[in-house]
Image (cartoon, rainbow, N blue to C red):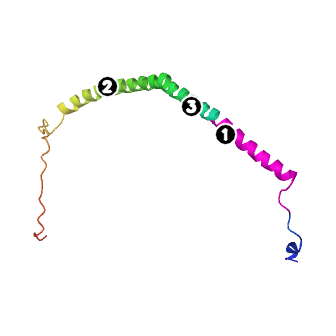
Amino acid sequence: MIYSQFQQPFQQRFSGSKGWLAFAIGITVIALGLLALPFVLLFLAVGFIAVSLFGRFYIKPKMDQFKRQAEQAQYQQQGFTEEAEEVVSHSTRFGDDSFKPRPHQGRIFEHDPNERV
C-alpha cells in the first residue's frame, strides 16, 4: 500500500504547450521586473529627496525653535537657582566656602618588573 505510488508511472513534467506557456510567463515576469526596476529606483530617489527637503525646511527650524525655548527656560531656571544659592550661602552655619578647585596634576607610576608586590 505504501509503495503503490511507485507502481504508477511518474507524472510528466511540463511539456508541450504547458511548458512553453510556463517559460513565456517566466520570461515575461523577469522582463517586466527589469523594466520596472529603474522606475522603482527613481521613485525611491524622489522620495528620499522629498524627505530630505522636508527635514531641512520644516523640521530643522522647529528643532531650532525648541532648542531656543529650552535655553531660555534653562537660563530662567539658572536665575532662580542663583538667587536661591545666594540666600542659602548667606545663611550657612559653616561660614564661607573657601574651597577652590585646582587643576588636576596627574602622576605617572613607572612599572618596575623586578619590584615585588
In this rendering, the answer to whether 15 lies above or below 78 is below
Distance CA(mark 2)–CA(mark 3):
43 Å
Q: Is residue 71 left or right of residue 100?
A: right
Label 2 neighbour load within 10 Å: few <14, some 14-19, many 20+: few
Q: Do the numbered discs 1 and 2 sit on residues whose CB atoms are within 8 Å? A: no
In this rendering, the answer to whether 26 lies above or below 68 is below
Secondary structure under tag 3 reads helix
Q: Amino acid at mark 1?
A: Leu
Distance CA(mark 3)–CA(mark 1):
17 Å
Q: Which residues are magenta?
A: 12-37
Residue that carries the numbered disc 3 in the rendered image: 45
Q: Position of residue 110 (x, y in %)?
A: 11, 59
Q: Quadrant of the N terminus?
A: bottom right
Which corner quadrant of the image does residue 50 belong to? top right
Secondary structure under tag 1 reads helix
Q: Quadrant of the C terminus?
A: bottom left
Query: How many badges with numbers are in the image?
Result: 3
Q: Amino acid at mark 3?
A: Ala
Residue that carries the numbered disc 2 in the rendered image: 75
* Pointer 2 or 3: first along the chain: 3
